Amino acid sequence: MFPERLARGYRNFIGSRFASERARYQELAGLGQKPSIMVMGCVDSRVSPEVIFDAAPGEILVARNVANLVPRYEPGGGQHGASAALEFAVRALKVAHIVVLGHAFCGGIKAFVRDDAPLTESDFIGKWMSQIAPAAQAIGPQGDEGEESYLRKLEFASVELSLRNLMTFPFVKSAVEKGELALHGAYFGVASGRLLVRNEKTGAFEPVGD
Ligand SMILES: [Zn+2]
């Protein structure tokens, strides 16, 4: 049976939000979507970019995967969902911004740090998360800071790594160099609701201005 929670939510949506934004939906249907911002987010149910950024339909293109990772450019072989979304956003939609949105208490990052036993024989999560090894290397081994603090550090470092990986895509690099595309890092504190944005010059994550 289709979940009642979703049926109820849909009825609310069609009666309120869709009703008030009907013209916008119709316009988007006719003209097609033209979002200028792409967000690479985590699948985590607490970190929905449309909710956090209060987005209207058509405003942001969202791609989500475990731990909001952008893989390195790897043409040939494999089924590259994240890379396909990126290609679509940059080449077809010509977005002006890509935001890699990290977050606190990320289960994917934790699984990597704890080297969790695979959930299935195929171990999709383990293979997927192994790509943040360079981020872990960059911050060094866990010291006296305790696991929680180390996890936070690695969450930020993996956003940095994804920003670097973005530049391995020739079409991203060329759009950035032409000044047509800007890359941003951000981080959502799930418990506090605080959004930190990466300062391009210093690399520090700072609270977003009022
Ligand atoms: Zn996550």
Image: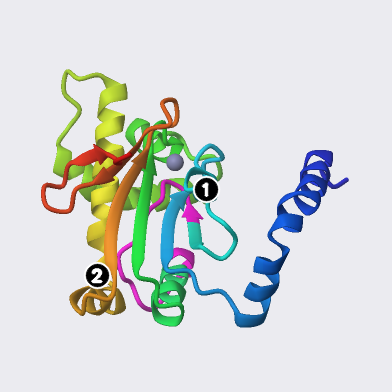
Assign the C terminus to one quadrant of the image. Answer: top left
Q: Is residue 74 magenta?
A: yes
Q: Tell me where the magenta segment starts and ends, as one range.
A: 64-82
Which amino acid does the dot numbered 1 rest on? Asp
Residue pointed to by mark 2: 168
> Which residue shows up at 82% across the image and 42% down it?
8
Which amino acid does the dot numbered 2 rest on? Thr
Residue pointed to by mark 1: 54
> Which residue shows up at 61% across the image and 81% down it?
31
In this view, 78 is above or below 135:
below
Q: Quadrant of residue 179?
A: bottom left
Does the beta carbon at disc 1 come under 8 Å from ligand 1? Answer: no
The front one of 43 and 91 is: 91
The front one of 88 and 58 is: 58
Assign the N terminus to one quadrant of the image. Answer: top right
Q: Main secondary structure of the magenta part?
A: loop
Q: Which mark is residue 9?
A: none
Residue 37 pos. (x, y %):
42, 64
For the question of whether residue 70 can be seen, the reply is no
CA neighbours of label 1 inside 10 A, class few (<14), some (14 to 19), many (20+): few
Residue 74 pos. (x, y %):
33, 72
Residue 23 pos. (x, y %):
70, 68
Kindly report the distance in space between the C-alpha atoms of the residues bearing marks 2 and 1: 31 Å
> Which residue shows up at 22% across the image and 60% down it?
164
In the rendered structure, the answer to whether residue 205 lies left or right of residue 41 reads left
For the question of whether residue 49 can be seen, the reply is yes
The front one of 201 and 30 is: 30
Q: Quadrant of ligand 1?
A: top left
Q: Quadrant of residue 20?
A: bottom right
In this view, 135 is above or below 86:
above
How was this image coloured? rainbow
